[in-house]
Image (cartoon, rainbow, N blue to C red):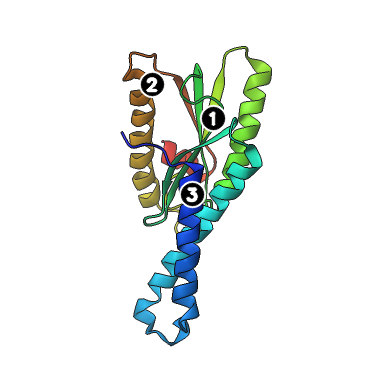
């Protein structure tokens, strides 16, 4: 398996993306043919994702939040674990809904995940960790009636859940009791 990205790697990534933004946008990008403007859009999206991850990690502290996945390709993919994902008996995975993709929904999804973790701690003596999973191209109003994005997201979610279990059982540990919570269109992804 791949080593999860560290906070230091996020800092380095941000430095690189900010330099790329300056290079691309500072070079009079408005004069570049429209066919090549996707480069600037990709840099802006990657920077938005990385900056939201940086804010979440800074706000929650090292002991509570851990970056599990950071992928800036396509719509991006982010997974942030709250609590002891490697050792908790119960692990919940929160999947956001419409409009909550990696560029726009990380902070809100982590807030929902944190509330779920706090409530679980109040109601059970068993350890619970929660993963905020923002790993699909969440639809806007024009796409919400269609399931294509949910199907693609569901495949990614299933792969990440298998990886979670494999990471726990590879060294002879027990798999966690996993619960997946989908909000709005996220419930279609989960289904």
Report the number of discs.
Answer: 3
Foreground tag (2 vs 1): 2
In the image: residue 146, left or right of residue 115: left
Proximity of marks 2 and 1: CB atoms separated by less than 8 Å: no
Q: Image height check: is 56 above or below 21? A: above
**Residue designated by label 3:** 10
Residue at 41% over, 54% down = 72
**Front-most of residues 144 and 54:** 54
In the image: residue 73, left or right of residue 65: left
In three-dimensional space, the C-alpha distance between marks 1 and 3, rounded to whole angstroms, equals 21 Å
**Front-most of residues 145 and 76:** 76
| Residue 135 rendering spot, x and y as whole percentages | 43, 45
In three-dimensional space, the C-alpha distance between marks 2 and 1, rounded to whole angstroms, equals 15 Å
Crowd tier of the residue under label 1, counting other residues whose Cα lies within 10 Å: few below 14, some 14–19, many 20 or above: many
Proximity of marks 2 and 3: CB atoms separated by less than 8 Å: no
- Mark closest to the chain's N terminus, 2 or 1: 1
User: In terms of image quadrants, where is residue 35?
Assistant: bottom left
**Residue designated by label 2:** 168
């Amino acid at each position: 398996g791949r080593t999860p990205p560290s906070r230091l790697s996020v800092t380095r990534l941000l430095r690189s993306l900010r330099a790329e933004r300056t290079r691309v946008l500072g070079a009079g990008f408005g004069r570049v043919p429209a066919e090549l403007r996707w480069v600037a859009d990709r840099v802006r999206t990657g920077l938005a994702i990385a900056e939201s991850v940086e804010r979440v990690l800074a706000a929650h502290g090292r002991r509570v939040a851990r970056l599990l996945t950071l992928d800036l390709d396509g719509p991006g993919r982010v997974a942030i674990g709250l609590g002891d994902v490697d050792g908790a008996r119960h692990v919940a995975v929160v999947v956001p809904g419409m409009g909550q993709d990696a560029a726009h929904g990380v902070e809100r999804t982590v807030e929902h995940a944190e509330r779920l973790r706090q409530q679980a701690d109040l109601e059970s003596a068993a350890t619970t960790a929660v993963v905020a999973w923002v790993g699909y191209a969440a639809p806007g109003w024009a796409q919400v009636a269609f399931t294509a994005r949910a199907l693609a997201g569901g495949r990614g979610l299933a792969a990440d859940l298998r990886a979670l279990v494999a990471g726990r059982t590879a060294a002879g540990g027990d798999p966690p009791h996993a619960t997946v919570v989908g909000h709005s269109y996220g419930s279609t992804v989960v289904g």
